[in-house]
Amino acid sequence: MKDNTVSTAIGSENVAISISQNIQQRHLPHGTILDPVFKAVDSDEIDYYARGGDSAIWTGHYLAAEAFRYRVTAEAAALEDVRRALAGIRLLVDVTGNNLLARCLFPTNSPYAGKIIEEENRHGVYTSMLNGQEYQWIGNASRDQYSGVIFGLGVAYDMVEDAETRAEIRDLVTRLLDFLVERHWFVVMPDGSISTVFTGHPDQRLSFLQVGRRVNPARFGDRYTDHRRLHSIQVIAPIAFDVLDDHNSYFKFNLDTINFYNLIRLENNSTYRNRYLRAYDVLRRTTDDHGNAHFNMIDHALRGANDSRDAATRELLDQWLLRPRRDKFLDWRGDSHYPTSAENRTSVVMPVVNRINTDFLWQRSPFLLSGGGAGLIETAGIDYILPYWMARFHGVINEGLNIPPRPTRPPIEPPSRT
């Protein structure tokens, strides 16, 4: 039994490493995460790249995944991947010229530039010179992008105990926070327009400043302490609003969860930590039965081991391995396994193997009945490697873990549609 478990863990590790290798080969054409669109369903020839508007957030998540991988394995390849992800984030900060975060960037002469602009033109396209190369970059940075990047930087600072890497992270966090603080938490574009504001989100401001205090206490320690004293009591307010709807705009739960991760784990004052945990409990009571391996691992990191939750996480990750990597359209409406409770919503949590394809599975509602694309876009797989390497770091998955191998349910084929 133990030998089978070891081989299962090793097999999962090999899959995780192959996903990272594929990301390097296919998903970082300009240094940050993009998803390739292939010429045909059965082709591996890349036609163009898509999903550039969320390149920053997933580059931050990818950085976190590789940082956990490096802490677990100490492999040079993992450290190199960390450094490449950091280099990509630096490009997103450098290219704007004033420490504003870009959504994504690409050389003006990239063969993929036209399609990225076509898809993301609504966010604003800007041109800058960087290191002798003309780049175009996508503006209208959102709170999502900042949350993902700072989440990744905070994880990497603690997982990678390398002086050069930590200095790089310290510089990036300082520049990003200086931009926000100097503008009173308004994200201002080069044309003077405001793309988003953090004023109604004390949880996000405090989480960012918490990471700032961790990496640069001289610069942000007092600012965080003052902000905590004034605003920590308000942290629960945006969470209480978010949980009123557990289906629409589901991505909000990912933002809430990753921001709580750094906010709570780095808090050294028990009074404030308990205050943050009470707000987190409101969020967790909403998502704890959603079959979400990513949220489960953050809960493990904040709350410690729980046998049933951790066993469920292993099963959820096993199911992920059976999912298609491309955005095949799925439609479960009318299927008796998934009774409809509202428009495009089932009343039961969908099995992971049958959930709608997206860029990051764990930010998609588990109740969604239909969606996807033409089967041409390949998902990066960060939604596997991030919870997987977190699970390895925390001992939820271990090569020597003495548990029976877990049978994995095959996906149910959706009914055909005419």
Image (tube, rainbow, N blue to C red):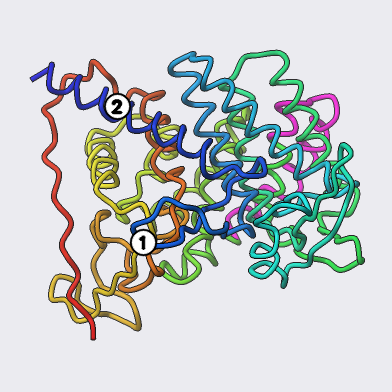
**Callout 2 crowding tier (Cα within 10 Å): few <14, some 14–19, many ≥20:** many
Q: Quadrant of residue 85?
A: top right
Tell me if I can see residue 301 in this picture: yes
Mark 2 residue element = loop
Residue 395 drawn above or below residue 342 = above
Q: Range of the magenta residues?
A: 211-237
Between residues 261 and 191, which one lies in front from this camera angle?
A: 191
Can you identify the residue that label 1 sits on?
41
Query: Where residue 288 sits in the image (x, y, percent)?
Result: 34, 51
Magenta stretch: dominant SS? helix
Identify the residue at horizontal 55%, vertical 34% (top origin): 64
Q: Quadrant of residue 4?
A: top left
Identify the residue at horizontal 81%, vertical 54% (top origin): 185
- Furthest toward the bottom, the residue is 418
Query: Where residue 176 sits in the image (x, y, percent)?
Result: 79, 42
Q: CA distance from mark 1 to mark 2?
A: 34 Å
Residue 50 drawn above or below residue 60 = below
Query: Where residue 66 sits in the image (x, y, percent)?
Result: 52, 29
Tell me which amino acid carries mark 2: Ile
Q: Is residue 229 magenta?
A: yes
Q: Looking at the image, is mark 1 or mark 2 earlier in the sequence?
A: 1
Q: Quadrant of residue 72?
A: top left
